[in-house]
Amino acid sequence: MSRYFYYLVVVEFVGSILSVIPSFLFESSKKGTIMSMLLALLAGVAFIYWITKFFNHYPGRGLPELLQQHIPKWIAFPIFFMLSFAWFIFGLKTLLNYSFLLKRFLLPHLQIHWIIALVLLFITYSFFMKTKKLLYTLEIVLFINIPLMIYIVGILYVNTALDWDYVKKSMMYVYHAPSLLAFSASFLIFIGASNLIIVNREFKNKQKLTIFQILLLFVLGAWILFTNYFIPIGYNGFQQIQYINFPWILGTDSLKVALAFLERIMFVFLFLHISVTFVNIIIFWHVSLELLKSTAKLVRRKQKESNMITYIFAFVVWSISLVVSMNITESSYLMYARSLFVAFPPFFLFLLIVCWFISWRDKHDNRSLKTN
């Protein structure tokens, strides 16, 4: 597989650390979180395998091209629009979480809508970037940040402040029935491969996902889930952790290192994660925009009108983001996020069904041509 495929998967893995995913896992810590993570690990790796295997059969083509070829326009149009809206929601959810994080730990005196406006100033430029340039940006950000983040997580593992007794206590709930919210939250760290619906256009050569690569993703996903759940418990305790919104920040704030001019790990970790999350938002909205352009191409194919869609999309992103930020609090955001998280697994199941239908139609059409 192309290295950019792994970047798409890894950026979602890393982005989950300071998202609301750990909070939802801790919310169900006594109601089957561990069993939910195990099931989500199997479902997530299976999702990556199936969607990657599908797109490997169609090098250089994204989902819009395949839908236009095998599905009537009147069916493809609502599918395009629904997928575009879903990826827009993914980006908006990440932006809100990102902004609340900035407000709480870096910019406490700034209103949330001003923080979002500041972030959108930089994100808007990405709307005019090609997919290939976006992948180059992703590569640079991960190349700089991942080694430092691995170093910080390594310190968290070996630090004496990590109480493994809390971890062992949390493992006593392994036999509890799984929770839907915990399963959905765990599953969402595996959705990075779904960006192939657009990014596959850049993979011109036929790709192959081997058993070794699947096992690698399985081990990496298991480690991310283990780290996401158990390390904050080891630093913050098990009984009250469900009431902490950003337990990873509190965990890193307990560490101090003598590294050049750096002493407090928390701010380093925060800035590293913010840059990765920033790129994650850009990817989500890039996919949403490309799907929206594909929706317009079903009706008209003029390049000028395609460029106009980018400006309209930027206006919609600014308008909705600012309006939502002015009418939402951190607690209400968590409430809405719970509902969204529960709805995401059925949505990705629908995406797989669409891919299966395209594959079935393609095989059926090929058989018809051979018969004729």
Image (cartoon, grey):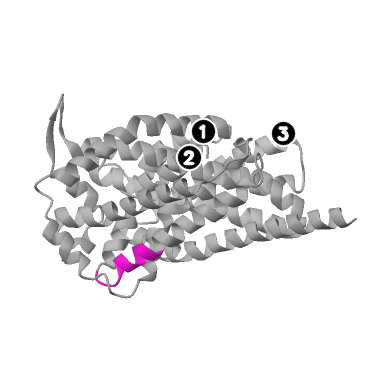
Identity of the residue drawn at 53% across and 29% down: 133
Residue 182: x %, y % from top left: 35, 65
* 322 is higher (above) or lower (below) than 240: above
Question: 10 Å neighbourhood of mark 2: few (<14), some, or many (≥20)?
Answer: many
Q: Magenta segment, which residues?
A: 30-39
Residue toward you, 11 or 244: 11
Report the residue that reaches farthest toward the bottom: 177
Mark 1 sits on what residue? Answer: 134
The tag on residue 304 is 3
Kind of element beneath mark 3 = helix
Q: Amino acid at mark 1?
A: Leu
Q: Mark 1 and mark 2: span between their CA atoms?
A: 8 Å
Q: Are marks 1 and 3 in contact (CB under 8 Å)?
A: no
Place of residue 96 in the rendered image (x, y in percent of width and height, measured from the top left): 39, 49
Question: In this rendering, which labeled residue sits more in front, label 1 or label 3?
Answer: 1
Asked if the residue under mark 2 is in contact with the one under mark 1, i.e. CB atoms within 8 Å, the reply is yes
Of residues 260 and 175, which is closer to you in this image?
175
Badge 1 density bin: few <14, some 14–19, many ≥20, Cα 10 Å: some
User: Which residue is located at x 74 percent, y 54 percent?
Assistant: 362
- Residue 36 is one of the magenta-drawn residues: yes
Q: Amino acid at mark 3?
A: Lys
Q: Secondary structure at mark 2?
A: helix
Q: The residue under label 2 is which amino acid type?
A: Ile
Mark 3 / mark 2, whichever is N-terminal: 2
Name the mark nearer the viewer: 1 or 2: 1
Residue position for label 2: 282
> 101 or 182: which is nearer to us?
182
Q: Is residue 10 above or below residue 338?
A: above
